[in-house]
Image: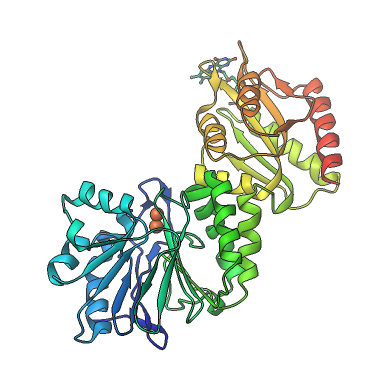
């Protein structure tokens, strides 16, 4: 049965949620599931914007049939050719022989790569500035390269002020009936997951996201329709102000996030001692993460959120301990920049973690490592206590 939703006079949401999924992109844990949204405009021409993931294709096809109410599908806009939004292209092109695919030249090539389907004769190739007239609606296309994939187009319908924003402005998390952001307590229940989604999916491409935001600022937007999570009808600033911070790598919270990697617990002890000292010096909302337990995607997200980061690691086979190594590599891969950093290392016979962490940080932009570096040689010593105090003083000063 159908679960399609009308979001304006003649625009439909045809999405579906997947709560069974463990890992989005087979890497990011999604304990609250994920939604795949797509949209249908019913005008003189009928036009679908994107598809969904394999897992919810049947739901989507039922919704589509219901919303079309006997009409044929004229166009399908493929804003980017990532499989989580494109699974039904083979079925749809078979079911609607007159259906035309509206997409970029690059995405058309990708369709043939994924599905061995040559749609050249049924394609309308568009790029930034092109338009598609549907009747009273006219979609104009806005390039947003790397706001997930290189060929991303967003689509703007000036007649209703609707921006179909592709993967931008989405979030992890299934939709629970309320498909509009103004129907939920977004700040409380969704902002953290929206950040984790943004940072991990497109955090690397801040420059390109800023360019897309600039283009969006020139449009008279009344509704934002992303491919994941809620539709936005108002309070755009809640989302846009965060996006502009995330895209420019500016922290949201002036406080310290401490990440540690510890085998026997001594490095963890040092991390907790530092946290306590910071708290005593007035720093609030400190967070401490055990890198062996916290998912990397969550830690990367928190590193984007916080102004001051402390990395504490035991030495492990002449390397940074396990997932701390991965965390630092991932932060670099996501182009995180401009943080104040404290370092704590541990090692019993040939400590190397601090030097290696510092090297990683030096390859990133504007990472300001604060002295002293705390150097533990197994258990926390009296000298280490002094170093931790000195580091806490410096970090607290930088936060005041
Ligand atoms: C598999 C393994 C490899 C290790 N490799 C090193 C090493 O290369 N250099 C070193 O100084 N210590 C090494 N250590 C020892 C720990 O880094 C050291 O005992 C440290 O104090 C542990 O801190 P923790 O209590 O926070 O786990 C290794 C330990 C293990 C289990
Ligand atoms: Fe995508
Ligand atoms: Fe997506």
Q: Residue at x 22, y 73 (%)?
A: 61
Q: Quadrant of the N terminus?
A: bottom left
In the image, 352 versus 82, the foreground residue is: 82
Task: Tell me the residue at 84%/30% (across/down).
Answer: 390
- The image position of residue 180, as x and y in percent, is 50, 77
- Which residue, as the protein is rendered here, is positioned at the far top? 349
Q: In the image, ligand 1 is in what quadrant? A: top right
Q: Position of residue 265 (x, y in %)?
A: 61, 31
Residue 345 as seen in the image, left or right of residue 117: right
Seen from the viewer's position, the closer of residues 36 and 279 is 36
Judge whether residue 298 can be spotted in this image. Answer: no
In this rendering, the answer to whether 239 lies above or below 351 is below
Taking 394 as reference, is 251 above or below it?
below
| Residue 302 locus on image (x, y percent) | 61, 48
The foreground one among 90 and 318 is 90
Residue lying farthest to the front in this orientation:
130
- Exactly how many numbered labels are in the figure? 0
Q: Position of residue 263 (x, y in %)?
A: 55, 28
Q: Is residue 130 left or right of residue 291?
A: left
Q: Residue at x 86, y 40 (%)?
A: 397
Decide which of 215, 89 is in the foreground and name it.
215
- Residue 86, above or below 302: below
Tell me what residue is drawn at x 64 percent, y 34 percent. Answer: 268
Work out whether residue 161 can be spotted.
yes
């Amino acid at each position: 049965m159908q679960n399609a939703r009308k979001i304006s006079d003649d625009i439909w949401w045809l999405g579906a949620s997947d709560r069974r999924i463990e890992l989005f992109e087979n890497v990011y844990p999604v304990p609250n599931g994920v939604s795949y949204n797509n949209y249908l405009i019913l005008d003189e021409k009928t036009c679908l914007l994107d598809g969904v993931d394999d897992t919810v294709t049947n739901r989507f096809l039922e919704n589509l049939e219901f919303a079309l109410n006997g009409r044929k599908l004229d166009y399908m806009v493929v804003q980017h050719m990532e499989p989580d939004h494109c699974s039904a292209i083979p079925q749809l092109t078979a079911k609607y022989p007159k259906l035309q695919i509206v997409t970029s030249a690059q995405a058309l090539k990708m369709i043939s790569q994924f599905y061995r389907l040559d749609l050249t004769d049924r394609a309308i190739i568009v790029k930034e500035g092109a338009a598609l007239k549907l009747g009273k609606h006219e979609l104009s296309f806005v390039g947003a390269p790397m706001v997930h994939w290189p060929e991303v187009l967003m689509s703007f319908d000036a007649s209703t002020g609707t921006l179909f924003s592709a993967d931008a402005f989405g979030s992890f998390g299934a939709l629970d009936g309320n498909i509009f952001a103004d129907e939920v307590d977004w700040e409380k229940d969704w902002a953290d997951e929206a950040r984790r989604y943004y940072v991990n999916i497109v955090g690397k491409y801040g420059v390109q996201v800023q360019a897309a935001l600039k283009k969006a600022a020139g449009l008279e937007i009344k509704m934002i329709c992303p491919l994941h999570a809620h539709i936005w009808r108002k309070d755009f600033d809640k989302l846009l102000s965060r996006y502009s911070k995330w895209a420019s790598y500016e922290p949201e919270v002036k406080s310290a996030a401490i990440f540690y990697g510890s085998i026997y617990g001594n490095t963890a002890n040092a991390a907790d001692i530092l946290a306590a000292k910071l708290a005593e010096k007035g720093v609030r909302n400190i967070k401490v993460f055990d890198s062996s337990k916290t998912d990397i995607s969550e830690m990367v997200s928190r590193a984007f959120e916080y102004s001051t980061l402390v990395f504490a690691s035991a030495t492990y086979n002449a390397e940074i301990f396990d997932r701390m190594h991965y965390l630092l590599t991932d932060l670099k891969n996501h182009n995180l920049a401009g943080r104040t950093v404290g370092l704590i290392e541990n090692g019993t016979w040939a400590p190397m973690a601090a030097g290696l962490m510092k090297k990683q940080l030096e390859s990133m932009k504007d990472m300001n490592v604060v002295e002293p570096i705390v150097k533990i040689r197994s258990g926390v010593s009296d000298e280490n206590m002094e170093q931790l105090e000195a580091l806490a003083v410096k970090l607290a000063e930088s936060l005041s």
